[in-house]
Image (cartoon, grey):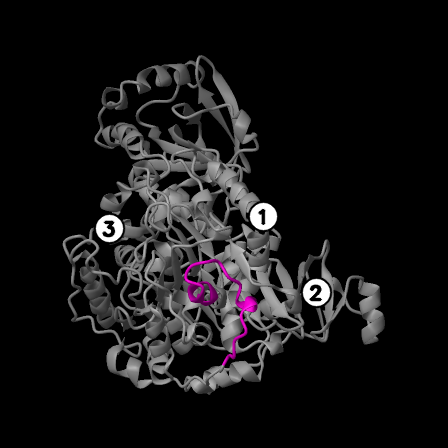
Amino acid sequence: MIRLYDNGVYLLNGTEVVEDIREAEAKIGHAVSKEEAAKQTMAYNILADHNVSGNMERLQIKFDKLTSHDITFVGIIQTARASGLEKFPIPYVLTNCHNSLCAVGGTINEDDHMFGLSCAKKYGGVYVPPHQAVIHQYAREMLAGGGKMILGSDSHTRYGALGTMAMGEGGPELVKQLLNKTYDIKMPGVIAIYLDGEPIKGVGPQDVALAIIGATFGNGYVNNKVMEFVGPGVEKLSADFRIGIDVMTTETTCLSSIWKTDEKIREFYELHGREADYKELNPGEVAYYDGMVYVNLSEIKPMIAMPFHPSNVYTIDEVNANLSDILHDVEKKALVSLDGAVDYSLQSKIVDGRLYVDQGLIAGCAGGGFENICAAADIIRGKYIGADEFTFSVYPASTPIYMELVKNGAVADLIQAGAIVKTAFCGPCFGAGDTPANNAFSIRHSTRNFPNREGSKLQSGQISSVALMDARSIAATAANRGFLTSATDLDVEYKGPKYHFDSKIYANRVFDSHGVADPSVEIKFGPNIKDWPAMSPLPKNLVVKVVSEIHDPVTTTDELIPSGETSSYRSNPLGLAEFALSRKDPAYVGRAKEVQKAQKALEAGECAGEALPELKPVMEKIREKFADVSHDNIGVGSTIFAVKPGDGSAREQAASCQKVLGGWANIANEYATKRYRSNLINWGMLPFITDQDHEKLSFKNGDYIFVPDVRKAIEEKKDVIMAYVVGEELTELPLKLGDLTDAEREIILKGCLINYYRG
């Protein structure tokens, strides 16, 4: 079904795979070098077109367009304003698809929307009102273009199927683009995703995506690399099908994605009135890839990603055939994810030997596409979900899609069967819509199923389970009134109706400045919208207290700053910070604030030891070896340890909340994603790496760590900084910083990106 190549490969004329360069040369009839072949990927050429550094090893990228949603755009614009923003230099689209339910947090969310509209007018942007479209569907319909690059402040910013290389990053990276700066990275590796065969009837894009995620996430095969989709199987897939796979590439932890394009993609652009934005993309005659994932589409079966990660995959047939054993295995894995905070069992979901689920959802940028929902309607037409616990909700990804589903009768079929069809909203993906009941089991065609993402509150004893599936098998399960069913088990006639895009829907409701700024517009600030607090530059010496210690194999951004109802406070840095690690380590905020008292005392010219008495013996021990350390040349803050933090969302608040609570650093064995590490750096936090086994650390929660001459080490570009765990003695603790650009070092020295641009 899926094969990972151990080494790099050569792709000849976009179809033939060769592992040896001599064989490649023999087949094409002339000499070729690995270096030249690496320049023949689609990814390389798009990056080259957008790189302004003149050095393809050290890229400085300028994007064509930007996009954000209402959880992130307030903080981004506030940061840019504080750094000197006058107008949006490139098209910037502000969608309102996350904080759409204004009942959550009273009027707070709608205040953010009005802030966005006024900023779109003042700075020359585009404003998409709530319920019109989820961020990524609007980008597909209205922003994507062949050979272009888009940067979005949402991790699922993926438009590769349309020939657009898109990346999801934390807000500060968008701020840099708004200030005419660049996105700086090393040239990423490129991995070919070679699609062969053709999906069988009943298999959808989520099935293919989950199979790929299951094969690549755990081993990091595509981590921070570009996934390039090639092979004869691509042409067998519709544009919607490709889009459905592409958006889920984020869950592999890749950097970006790009697909070869063809007439089906040209038709997509033509359908949306933008044929001029189409560009045919193919790899060159001989393209070298750093690795290859071979996918036989014909062998993919309906899949399910069991709790609590998209990579925890099985076929639905496997689950149904080995139900008790697999549920028991999920329960064992949950002991790690849930830290034993709740009693977790799925055995009650076995009813008459079958798995009964409580909820089915088809939603958002992954599930809410036209073809997915039409297929679901075909499956459930003439059937009924029943009057028991099982519920079924469908969220079309945009109002134009919704309108066409109304016109072709799919909405009527779904509603008649007992489904509820709702407006475009990302809430089900992050815990703010259709959150399951305690102990409920939900199946979803959405993006993630992390344990803290769908409404679970472990500190309150509340837990729910979410599994990811394709819309087709969700509809089949709904047709069987909640009993897990593979779509391939049903004999269904799929009508495959043609889609018609109505451009008037957006023309009548979306505000588009067409790039013209109006400085006379006054920005509308709701009472919850607050400026970033002042942040100090990096001191000469640093002492940090470990205030949280996390030993999970991977720590998600949802565990660092919970999603869901907390999103109402994302325009209020200090208000949101109160929720940091609240579902993973509820004592974190109190500990961090206690340490922060010492730094605030130093900034006020007062004695840190008086503000934080436990610091006095620590400083005495430090001065025994470093006599010149004083309140004039030291900073005090907090740090957390996590084995591999940062999987999941691009949201910058996972880092900024730590910063505004006095965080100076993270210590990790590695970082799950580039975007989380970038967020740390952009908020002036040190992204330390330790080689120590996480089960044998020389420090623990509550310990102080002294980092002498940390500022000098950053200035001198040292790879390793010698720190010391402060106990009865000073114990050496080597800490690595990893690769940093000159700009990133300067941002850390200045204390954060805002300070960096203020000069």
Give the SS element for disc 3.
helix
Q: Point out the tag, 2 or 3, that comes first from the N-terminus.
A: 2
Categorize mark 3 by other alpha carbons within 10 Å: few (<14), some (14-19), many (20+): many
Q: Nearer the viewer, residue 40 or 311?
A: 311
Q: Which residue is mark 2?
A: 288
Name which residue type carries label 1.
Answer: Gly
Give the SS element for disc 1.
loop
Q: Point out the tag, 1 or 3, that comes first from the N-terminus.
A: 1
Does the residue at mark 1 contact the one at mark 3 (Cβ under 8 Å)?
no
Q: Is residue 744 above or below residue 538?
A: below
Does the residue at mark 2 contact the one at mark 3 (Cβ under 8 Å)?
no
Q: Is residue 670 left or right of residue 94?
A: right
Q: Per the image, is 476 magenta?
A: yes
Q: What residue do we see at 74% from left, 66% from top?
A: 10
Where is residue 735 shown, x and y percent of the image? 52, 32
Q: Which residue is mark 1?
A: 218
Picture quadrant where residue 262 is located? bottom right
Q: Nearer the viewer, mark 1 or mark 3?
A: 1
Name which residue type carries label 3.
Answer: Tyr
Q: Is residue 377 left or right of residue 632?
A: right
Q: Main secondary structure of the magenta part?
A: loop
Categorize mark 1 by other alpha carbons within 10 Å: few (<14), some (14-19), many (20+): few
Q: Nearer the viewer, residue 119 or 197?
A: 197
Q: Nearer the viewer, mark 2 or mark 3?
A: 3
Q: Residue furthest front?
A: 352
Q: Which residues are magenta?
A: 475-494
Q: Nearer the viewer, residue 143 or 496?
A: 496
Q: Nearer the viewer, residue 168 or 613?
A: 168
Give how far apart the Cα atoms at labels 1 and 3 are.
33 Å
Q: Which residue is mark 3?
A: 569
Name which residue type carries label 2.
Answer: Tyr
